[in-house]
Structure formats: C-alpha cells, structure tokens
Amino acid sequence: MVSAAEQLAANLNFSALAKAEELKKRIWFTLGALLVYRFGTYIPLPGIDPTAWDQIFRTQAGGILGMFNMFAGGGIHRMAIFALNIMPYISASIIIQLMTTVSPTLEQLKKEGEQGRKVINQYTRYLTVVLAAFQSYGIAIGLEGAGNVVSDPGMFFRISTAITLTGGTMFLMWLGEQITARGIGNGISLIIMAGIVAELPSAIAGMLELGRQGALSTGLILVVIVMAVVVIAFIVFMERAQRRLLIQYPKRQVGNRMFEGQSSHLPLKLNTSGVIPPIFASSLLLLPTTIAQFNSQGGGPEWWQTIVTQLSHGRPMFLILYIALIVFFAFFYTAIVFNPTETADNLKKHGGFIPGIRPGERTAEYIDYVLSRITVVGAAYLAIVCLIPEMLIAYAAVPFYFGGTSLLIVVSVTMDTVAQIQGYLLAHQYEGLIKRSKLRGRRR
C-alpha cells in the first residue's frame, strides 16, 4: 500500500516535471511563432520588381521608410507581405485608448472589467483593419508612382496589395495574441523586437563595411560600440527605477483578535509611457522629408523646401522639435495609461491610504503630483537616450539600428520577457513550497 505522504511526494515530482515541460513548450511556441513572422518578411508582394524597389528604397532610407523598415524587420526594404508589420494595430490601440478618455461609452466599457476589455479589443481590431487598408492602399499608389516598380499598375494591383498587406497585419496581430496567450512575454512587443534584432547583424556588417571603405573611422566605430553598451546599461537602470508610495491599511478585528495594520507600496515607474514617445516623435518629424523625397518633381514652394531642409537629421530645428515632441508624448501617453483618480478610488475601496493624505480626491491629487514630477525625469531620460544616437546617425551615417529608439525597444522587451519567465518560475517554486509543507505536515 502507498501512504498518503508517498502519494503526495509523487504528485509533487510529477507537478514539477509538468511545470518544466509547460515552460519549455511555451518557449518553443514563442520561437516558432517568431520564425513564422521572419519567414513572412521575405515573401515579396506580387506584381512588383524587387530590384527597382531596392534602388528607390536606398535613396530614401534616411526618411520615415528607414525607421519603419527597422520596426518591420526589413519587410519594407523587401516590400514583403508583412511590410506594414503591426504598426496599424499599435496606432489603433493608442487611438482607442485616447477615445476612452473622451467617450463616455468607451469609458464605461473600460470600467466593466474583463467583458468590457473584450469589447474594446474588438473595436481595436476593427480600427486596425481600417487603418491597415488605408495605409496599404496608399502604399500601392506610392509604388505605382515610384517609377518602374509595378509591372502592371491599375486598380487590380491596388486592391490586391491592400488585401495582402492588410491580411499580413491581421495575421501578425493574431500571431501576437497567440504568443501572449500560449507563449512567453507580450507577443506584439516580441514581434517588433524580433524584427530589430534580426536586422542587427546586417547593420553591424554594413557599419564594418563602411569602416573598411574609409567612410567611418575606426575610432568612430569604437565610440558607437561603447555608446551602445553605455546606453543599454542606462536604459536598464532607468526602466527599473520606481517611486514607491507607502500604502497603509488599518487594523482589523476578527472575532476577539486584533490584527495589526499592514503596509505595502504603490510603485510608479519613472518611464510609464515606454517607447511610444520616441516612435511618434520620429514619425512626425520624418514625414515632411519623406513626402518631399516621394515628390518626383523635387520642387514645391520655397517655404516647404526650407522646412524640409531644417528638419533634416542633426539640424537644430529637428533636434529641438524632437526633444519637445518626446516630452509632450511622454506626458500625453502617461496620462492615458495611468489614471490617478481610478487608483485612488481602488485604494479607498480596499481601505488603503497614503499616510498624511486624506483618501479620495486628495489622494488622487497627490498621486498625480508625484507622477507628474517623475514623468519629467522620465521624459528627460527618453530625450537623452534618443538624442545622442540621433546626432551620430546624422553626422556619421550610423544605421538606425544603433539609435536610441531601437535599443530602447530591445532592452525594454527583453527585460519584460525575462521578468515574466522569472515570475513563472517563482510561482512554480512557491507552489512547490506549499506542497512540501503539506507533505511535512502529513508525515508528522
């Protein structure tokens, strides 16, 4: 006969093996999904001449196409079926989040919990289809007007391109959701990071080739490498930085026993907005240059040409506006993703309070006060991380992949993924400790 203790020990060992096997399956599923994504970035759109497009892309790689190509993992350079990547989904998510602050209907859905989030996610998918269709149709028109890229221009090419690129975006959105549910980490972020990391070897090889040809000096290459290491260390330090607000809970009486009040912390990240501010700031500033480059006439009003010239990489106006937009979007997006009033209400419902601050409205004002001041530091951090590499890109022809935005995305997503894996392992260890304590109790 098998004793209860022996049976529990056998179940504990089986559970440990099952958990390890599940984690392994999640990791392999994530890697397989990312491999599928990378394969799709090499399938070109039907009806285009890749060689002709490659020549045109190289002349415009310094504009918004170069930055979006970085996020698309080279998909725009190859004009693949995943050229749009999941940028329409990100744009749709931000628009919907913005609408929740001005639309009472969406705001009510946000407060309804899981069911409301499902409805909001469905609205986000619908808006993603609209944005992707609009952008893909614009790409089709742009390709037709870009020379001899399209072999058979016309309405059929436009519709087929719109359907293909929109379908690619929707597939990547679905793939990202599957990674989040069945894999490790945030699927959408991992797809963006995979595209950047996959193109890093070619970017390094291109930089070394420029050094061999004499376009980049050996000293400058060493400066770029040292700068990348320093920026990565700085990003890790700042992304981990938090301001912890002390939360106190009152004493509780259960029966005849009095329990002491507990305390915890409300962590406020120094950079709540993440990588959104640099992405949006770069997109807005590079848009005039890209429009001018697509203009085959090369003309336009004199004032327009002056603006385009002043918004080139490294120009004072570009750098000033770049910093200003990063700071603006840092505050703007922080206000969207973190609601001090909602946080204060939740604390009040659970009996928590900040020592010395009255619960309710005063707590919300205090949280907003603290959050505003740490966001100043967070915005300054984003501006520093993005500004120094931006100057190297402008004056030394360093690839986009060594810029602050790309390093910020890669480091942030890597940290989040590692944290999820560690959390998964810690949860497994905690479960094991509970079962071991039960085993000891039965043996006694």
Image: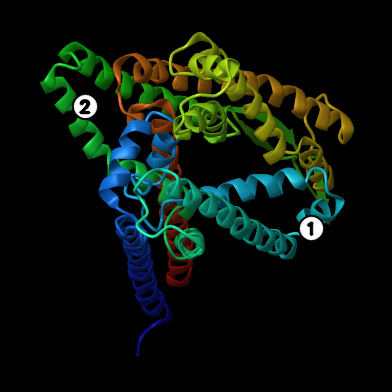
Image quarter (top left, top right, bottom left or bottom right) of the C terminus: bottom left
Q: Looking at the picture, how far across and down is residue 337, in whole percent?
A: 68, 40
Q: Is residue 151 left or right of residue 114?
A: left
| Local secondary structure at mark 1 | helix
Mark identifier at residue 286 = none
Q: Residue at x 77, y 30 (%)?
A: 354
Q: Quadrant of residue 204?
A: top left
The type of residue carrying mark 2 is Met
Q: In which quarter of the image is residue 405?
A: top left
Q: Residue at x 34, y 55 (%)?
A: 48
Give the colour scheme of this rendering.
rainbow
Mark identifier at residue 109 = 1
Mark identifier at residue 207 = 2
Q: Can residue 102 be seen in this view?
A: yes
Residue at far left of view: 212
Q: Looking at the picture, how far across and down is residue 159, in whole percent?
A: 51, 63
Return the residue nearer the eye: 49 or 131: 49
Q: In which quarter of the image is residue 5?
A: bottom left
Q: In this view, does 229 lie to the left or right of 364?
A: left
- Binning the other alpha carbons within 10 Å of mark 2 as few (below 14), some (14 to 19) or many (20 upward) gives some
The type of residue carrying mark 1 is Leu
Q: Residue at x 60, y 34 (%)?
A: 273
Nearer the viewer's eye, disc 2 or disc 1?
2
Q: Which residue is drawn at 78% across and 40% down?
A: 352
As drawn, 439 above or below 389: below
